[in-house]
Amino acid sequence: MSLLSERLGWIVFEAETKRLHELVKAVLPELDGIVGWEQGFDALHATPVFVNREEDVHRLMWSPLCVHNLSGYLVKTPPFLPRDEGRKVGICVKGCDSRSLVALEQEKFLGRDRLHIFGIPCEGTVDWRRVMKKIPLRGVSSVRREGPELKVEDSRGVHSLPWEESLARRCLRCAHPNPLVHDVLVRDPVEPRIKKDEAYGLVEEMDQKSLEERLAFWSAELDRCIRCYACRNACPLCVCQDRCIVETRDPKWLTQKMGISEKFMFHMIHSLHLAGRCTECGECERVCPMEIPVTLMKEKLNQITREILGYEAGIDSQLVPPLLTFNPGEHEL
Amino acid sequence: MHAHNPYLPELATVQEVIGETHNICTLRVVLNDPEKMKNFQFTPGQVGQLSIFGVGESTFVINSPPTRMDYLQFSVMRVGEVTQRIHLLNAGDQIGVRAPLGNGFPFEEMKGKDILFVGGGIGMAPLRTLLLFMLDNRQDYGDITVIYGARSPHDLCYSYEFDQWRSGGANLVLTVDTEHPGWKERVGFVPTVLKEEAPSAHNRVAIVCGPPIMIKFVLFGLKELGFEDDQIISTLEKRMKCGVGICGRCNMGSTYVCLDGPVFTYSELREMVPEL
Amino acid sequence: MSGKVFIPQDKLASALERLNEKVPVWVPVSQGADRWGIDFKPFRAGMVPVMDRQSTALPKEVIFPQVQTLMTFEYVKAPEDPGRVQLKLEEPPEAGNALVFGARPCDVRGFFTFDRVFTEGPFVDNQYKDRREKTLFAVLLCREADEACFCSSVGSGPADTAGGDLWITPVEGGYVVEGLSERGGSYVQLLGDPATEEQAAAASRSQEEVSRQKVGSLDPSGVVQGQKDRFEDKDFWRSMVNQCLGCGVCTYVCPTCYCFNITDEMRHSRGERMRSWDSCMFAVYTQEASGHNPRPTKLERYRNRVGHKFSYFPEKYDGMIACCGCGRCIRSCPVSIDIRKVVENLKERSHACA
């Protein structure tokens, strides 16, 4: 498999990728396919891939550029699910992605028994925009991790960046790098970067601001929103799909206007629909072409959920999410 | 070329609203500007966008013929937001009209030929404009047979005109899906009645409009009767917005239904990408 | 022509301030201190243009705003008969002039696609035409092509000046600017001091060097047939775009995507009819009032998107491809779908068929 990185010069964790290939080959006949990642159009991008033939298994890879949470494919139209009772589909998940599977199972969108989960303990995913901001690259030919550094080779030479500075914001606040559910692990578990209590630093920072400052912050951020709804479509728990409030005219919640109030309304409703459900995978923020920190809104709601209800979504498939149930004895509310 | 704002409708007044069926009504509309009404020209089969300002626009065929210009007539089935509001209109109400749009029927090429209209339900609307145009130019056309069907007698549009159509020189065959008390015409699905009537395909053009499932089986029937693809004409419906070939959504491949249609021969339809 | 001038890097902001007094200027600016993306915004004093990378969002907005009022309307009581309601329609005012500073060749090329649809009839979009005629482009010699770019594959190139009114060439320490059109030329003197011979020569060298570059290796010939051959091949489209999320990023960051929606908004008795960018990737785009949708899944939607750009548009408009090769749909796609790969595969399959 060394060919893979030689041929493409792309960041591939060879040992993990090789192991993944072995594990997939071993069970592929029992699966109706597997969704994982393959190399994308350049050295800084991977792309999701659906594999159901042994000759395509070599396309699968693992690297910190495998940024996508693939669990949404299991529930969004057309759902990637086994055709028959008793069959399974395979899915590759990082720690964060595995929490989406748990949450979807909690909400009965998925049956655990329909999945064969390839869990990948993750040391963080690379945010290509963050890398480009630090090093304006031209013609990237290879990207790799060397100890504490990310090494990038482009037309002008080799550049390095501290590993932490190349990571996505969601990864810097990740307390669950190891998949919580899996059938096999592709590599050994890794140490969490932080404890869960430390994950809400940015929320606390925002809370220190005055209402006016917060309004100014969100106005400036949301002003850039182009209403492409990538955040909605990438969210594995945004399950209304083609029945979204942004598209219904009756009742009409939103107009097509580009004002802050329309955009704010959409993002607020998106966030509120995820209150107590969001697993903070950060996909909404990752996919935003305008780099709006939209996960932050969900983080705030999750922080409240934790404080008031002591609940964290996507951890235990046996728990009922607090906003999906009603307990007359609840006195904290 | 139209140099003005192509999205700006003409203001118009609803002259009369006729209830056709439980979910179809017919509007008779007059443009507010008498000059524009007087000079309004169109081809049978062309469409118009009706505006309810504050709600939106929707596309309907102008189902009155250009030979009868006291008003422009549109028949509207209640399905969506705009059509629901249209159904609430009364005589005297103000609406907007953008018309004529689209291509219309090739009525010149049909001269000297026998004609077969096959319509189902609201699908009679686009046929009506051409039928009346032909009846008003009766000498230009040969036999005119109309097969028109609906679920029940209450679902037939323009029933108050059937006698006029007959006296004007149309061989009108009416049918409903099932027996109904007092119904004296045919009973059976349109494709079946077509088979029974079996009009000769020789020197004849068939114009078909109705629900997709009816069209599908009528096409089989016409083929059996010996109709060639270019002897069969139909009209397409798509979700439209601009109506003038710009906004992009009503395409089938490189064909824009709003601009190049809605009228197509079956041979043209077969050339287009199958995205109905 | 008024010759070439030189704008030192540190004088760019003040040059734009002078220009902005004559004509409202749009410039590419950063989306925020720790953001990678840049965006075209109306120039304000103190803004620092970012000229070293392609913008994420587009100067398309200048000529084709994301939301635009087509008309306003008001229901009023008829003066002679208060029981009757009349309608008053008003068209929006004409647009003002604008100059887009630092647009890249692909940004300008995009409007060539618009022009065919919006100005050639049979119906002419007067609002588009108005803004198009009143907007000038100071086009930047592009030296920043990346792995997603393929402008040379679709009839353009990094030194393309088509549609430009001014030409900006980055040189050591600043920019050499020259006029391309008469209107553009009239602003040249305003921007800086005449370029020295060395500066002018450096600019020419850079222009020659960049114009020799071939950005991208896509060959779009044969795609029209491929689209026809593979139109109903669901497995093919699934293998190409099964990972699509069905969001609107690719269309909203595309310089040639022009499809729009029209909606009404009303409060009390007044309102407006407006058009807003729409996306063929959205489910409701073609969904009819009855609920029927001729493009029910992402496969049909993507098929139409690639078909529109590489097959249907060329069929309708003398072979012109409705793609300027800017690569934004590839770069901004949340799942990195590569339209070049789809086009290449369409072709290959069609060769295989033949």
Image (spheres, coloured by chain):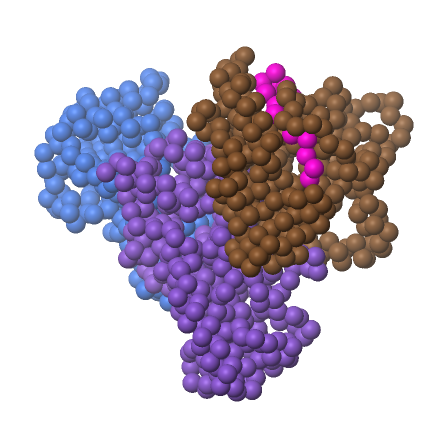
Chain colours: A brown, B blue, C purple
At a point 13% along the width and 32% down the height, the residue shown is B201
Q: Is residue C95 above or below residue B177?
A: below
In the visual, does B107 lie left or right of A120?
left
Q: Is residue A300 visible?
A: yes
Residue A120, position in %: x, y?
65, 30
At a point 60% along the width and 31% down the height, the residue shown is A15
In the visual, does C147 lie left or right of A169?
left
Q: Is residue C247 above or below residue A321?
A: below
| Location of residue C129 (image quadrant) | bottom left
In the visual, does A72 lie left or right of B91?
right
At a point 64% along the width and 62% down the height, the residue shown is C30
Q: Is residue C328 magenta?
A: no
Q: Nearer the viewer, residue C164 or C94?
A: C164
| Location of residue C229 (image quadrant) | top left
Q: Quadrant of the C terminus of chain C?
A: top left
Q: Nearer the viewer, residue B187 or C262?
A: C262
Residue C79, position in %: x, y?
56, 64
* Image: magenta residue range: A108-124
Q: Residue furthest right?
A: A331
Residue B272, position in %: x, y?
28, 41
Q: Quadrant of the N terminus of chain C?
A: bottom left
At a point 53% along the width and 18% down the height, the residue shown is A27
Residue A309, position in %: x, y?
84, 30
Q: Is residue A118 magenta?
A: yes
